[in-house]
Image: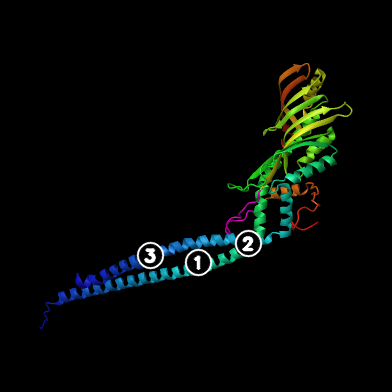
Amino acid sequence: MNEKINFLREKVSGLKQKATQLFIIQIISFSLLIIYGLGVVAVFAYFFILQKENDVLKERINQQKTAIQSFQSVETKEVYLKNKLKSLDQVLISQRANQKITDAVFNLLPEGITISGFAIDQDGGVSFSAQCQSLKDLKKFLANLELSKKVNEMMVKKIKIGGVNFNYEKGYSFNIYLLFEDQDNG
Amino acid sequence: MGNKHFVPLAVIAMVTMLTLLIVRPTLIKVITGQQENQKNKKILAQLIDKAEKLSSIDEVEMQKRVKSIEEVLPSEKPVMELINVLEQLSAEKEVIFSGIELKPGTIEEKAVNNPSKQKSLDISFNIEGKLANVSSFINDLEKTPPLMKIETMDLKFIGGREEKNLQTSLTVKVFYQSAPETIGAVDQPLAMLTDEERETLKKISSYRIFPKIQATAVVGKEDLFSLP
């Protein structure tokens, strides 16, 4: 019975296992390095694509700018119109109200009444000083104010008369404030 | 330690070095490039839109609009135009026009701040006529270029009841606005006229424009020393 006695068997097997482990670690390390390398290459490739795309975009932007500059006279006119229309609108809105209010006051005034300092405020209120020689004219004017609830789509909303004075030479004088409401605009 | 850990440690060292020296700066450039790319795409879209809008504008029609608005809201003080309009309008409405008082100020002023701001000058004058005529004059005044707004008004009925003549003193604000000096950057979006603004343009194009009075007399001399 010959039996082989191998004292190194366990040690050899341990060494083989270690060598296998080392091989696996090396494979994993190299694989990770390759994956990392591929990632780096991808980043570089993307960077170059991005740069190229940006160059193309810049070129197209310049082309469009040149095209726009050829329309400079049209653009100047458009900016000019826009700028002036903005200012114009504000004046036109206040004008519309002024015309109606002026017409309404004209219709309210009887003969014999002299008015001065006729001014229209931002709320559509009219203030003026009035003067008349006879009490009859004053009464007529007050009667007109009483009767005319609505004059040319303008509703008399508020009437305020103050400082009524009488002078033998100048007759009656008073200050008046009328507030109109445009029926067209509610 | 030696053999077993050499390769992984070398890989880690290599990756760290590559990351710090090459990959990180490249990634920063990529992020910046992406942001720039997005920004450029946005600018390009705006420019294409602007160029399309500009090419769609009818230049002849635009010129008409500019002319029309220049009559209504002139770029310079409309002193002579104003007197001309008031004279012609009063003649048409059969009212007596008198007592004009105008404070034009300096003829030319260089605006430093906000050059395209609306400005105005005041004019005072008297008109006298029948109530209907004066009323018509006042109504038409604010619909006649240059743009005017009645500020104050003094009214006095004169004459008999049959005549019902009205004497009116008016203070009118006349508006003007210098043209904008710059049109802004090329990549600034173009603001097109809104429907309301088109409506305003339509309205002012219906304004009555009185013919301008041209100076016909020859004034001045080319050669000061030439004999007549």
Name the residue that disc number 3 marks: B25
The three-letter code of the residue at mark 3 reads Pro
Residue A97: quadrant of the picture: top right
Identify whether B44 is placed above or below B98. Answer: below
The three-letter code of the residue at mark 1 reads Asn
Q: Residues within 10 Å of mark 2 (few under 14, many from 20)?
A: many
> A149 or B150, which is in the foreground?
B150
Q: In the rendered structure, the residue with mark 3 lies on which chain?
A: B
> A63 or A4, which is in the foreground?
A63
Q: Position of residue A126 (x, y in %)?
A: 71, 30
> A108 or B92, which is in the foreground?
B92
Residue most extreme to the left: A1
Identify whether A52 is placed above or below B86. Answer: below
Residue A156: quadrant of the picture: top right
Which is closer to the viewer, label 2 or label 3? 2
Magenta stretch: dominant SS? loop
Q: Position of residue B20 (x, y in %)?
A: 33, 65
In 3D space, how far apart are the residues under numbered discs 3 and 1 (Cα atoms)? 18 Å
C-beta proximity under 8 Å, tags 2 and 1: no
Direction from residue A108 to residue B44 in the image, left or right: left
Q: Does the rendering let one see residue A77?
A: yes
Name the residue that disc number 2 marks: B51
Q: Are marks 3 and 1 on the same chain?
A: no
The three-letter code of the residue at mark 2 reads Ala
In 3D space, how far apart are the residues under numbered discs 2 and 1 (Cα atoms)? 21 Å
Residue most extreme to the right: B162
Name the residue that disc number 1 marks: A54
Q: Is residue A56 magenta?
A: no
Q: Does the rendering let one see residue A153?
A: no
Range shown magenta: B178-192
